[in-house]
């Protein structure tokens, strides 16, 4: 998605340790016009699959999912992050290792909001190691529902999450795929 | 807002301890068509004030703010909740006491995303004790920006947050105001 790549080059910043900061338009301040274009592009990319519901994870996935959901005309469910070992009854949950925060946490979705045979599109802002998305896929499977696809705004293909998901047979589409970046501010997209 | 009140009566549940659960349409599963009607109503209610940016707080405010922002054609900024005493430089922050979780936490917004004299509309899902909103107002004032108004989806007028904000001279508008509710499932709105 050229508009998104241009925006990353213009307003993204590479912080030490290989962290791409897009907090001026995607995950702290949010350009809602850009989210609309992202939503339209997800609809175009997933126009050939059945989508009954969009699943994302708090916090930065929520805005993207809600704006995109308008193009699919379906509800959004967001998975909640909970302190480990503090799971109440009536939820599907999965453990996720966060490299950013250096700890393991549980994500959970109420059993009320994912039903057997529903077709679920998972949407999130970033895909790197893929741990969060694999946790969401696990939750969808616990519910007996189907993963229609995974839509990612920014994938880092130099980390292995994308490959892992594709090897699992997941229908993964990423709007901007970063092949490499370094602390000198160089950033290269996949074609 | 009658559509919202009807939905609360139809799909809301009163959990023990006076907690109104609206997780089937507002803050876990999200009815995005309802969010659109909420966004239009906020635009109507705040059509007479200048709004340069919408400020909300993670997680459940984000979807509401992003959908509403489309009607104002402005960006959204969401305040992040951080572990206490873990504030990095370059942020406006405020301490909030959460009655729901029984602890104090910091909320923060990067200094990059709130500027002096900007006109800020604060949006959130619930107003009860008002601590979260008062923290956001504090952050806006630290930035030297103006609070154009506060838009709330559901206010509980039997708690004192609304009165406190009105006494501060804040332009507060709530789409549904609950006067009373009890564990037997009775719920009464203000006129």
Image (cartoon, coloured by chain):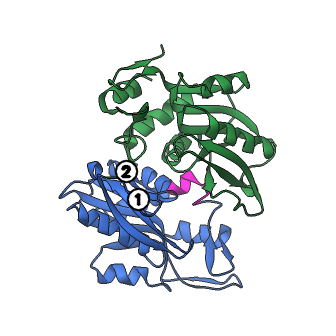
Chain colours: A blue, B green
Q: Residue at x 68, y 42 (%)?
A: B136
Say which element carries label 1.
strand
Q: Residue at x 52, y 48 (%)?
A: B62
Q: Which mark is residue B154?
A: none
* Residue marked by disc 1: A56
Q: Residues within 10 Å of mark 2 (few under 14, many from 20)?
A: many
Q: CA distance from mark 2 to mark 1?
A: 8 Å
- Residue B9 in view of the camera: yes
Q: Chain of mark 1?
A: A
Compare residues A164 and B95 and report the one nearer the observer: B95
* Residue marked by disc 2: A76
Q: Chain of mark 2?
A: A
- Give the vertical position of A115 relative to B74 (above or below): below
Compare residues B176 and A190 and report the one nearer the observer: B176
Task: Name the side, left or right, on which A4 lies relative to A185.
Answer: left
Q: Quadrant of residue B134?
A: top right
Q: Position of residue B114 (x, y in %)?
A: 74, 49
- Residue B48 in view of the camera: no
Q: Are marks 2 and 1 on the same chain?
A: yes
Task: Name the side, left or right, on which A16 lies relative to A55.
Answer: right
Q: Does the magenta portion include A29?
A: yes
Boundaries of the magenta span: A26-35
Quarter of the picture containing the N terminus of chain B is top left
Tag 1 or tag 2, which sits nearer the N-term? 1
Compare residues B79 and B16 and report the one nearer the observer: B16
Compare residues A33 and B84 and report the one nearer the observer: B84
Q: Most extreme residue toward the left, as rendered?
A: A117
Q: Residue at x 41, y 22 (%)?
A: B181
CB under 8 Å between callouts 2 and 1? yes
Task: Name the side, left or right, on which B80 lies relative to A52.
Answer: right
């Amino acid at each position: 998605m050229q508009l998104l790549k241009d925006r990353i080059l213009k307003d993204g910043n590479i912080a030490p340790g290989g962290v791409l900061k897009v907090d001026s338009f995607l995950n702290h301040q949010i350009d809602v016009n850009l989210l609309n274009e992202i939503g339209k592009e997800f609809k175009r990319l997933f126009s050939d699959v059945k989508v009954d519901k969009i699943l994302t994870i708090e916090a930065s996935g929520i805005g993207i999912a809600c704006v995109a959901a308008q193009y699919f005309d379906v509800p959004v469910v967001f998975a909640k992050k909970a302190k480990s070992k503090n799971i109440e009854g009536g939820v599907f949950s999965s453990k996720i290792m966060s490299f950013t925060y250096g700890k393991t946490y549980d994500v959970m979705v109420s059993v009320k909001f994912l039903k057997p045979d529903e077709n679920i599109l998972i949407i999130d802002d970033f895909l790197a190691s893929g741990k969060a998305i694999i946790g969401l896929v696990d939750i969808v499977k616990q519910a007996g529902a189907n993963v229609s696809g995974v839509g990612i705004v920014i994938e880092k293909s130099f980390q292995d999450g994308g490959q892992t998901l594709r090897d699992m047979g997941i229908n993964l589409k990423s709007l901007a795929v970063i092949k490499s970046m370094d602390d000198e501010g160089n950033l290269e997209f996949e074609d």
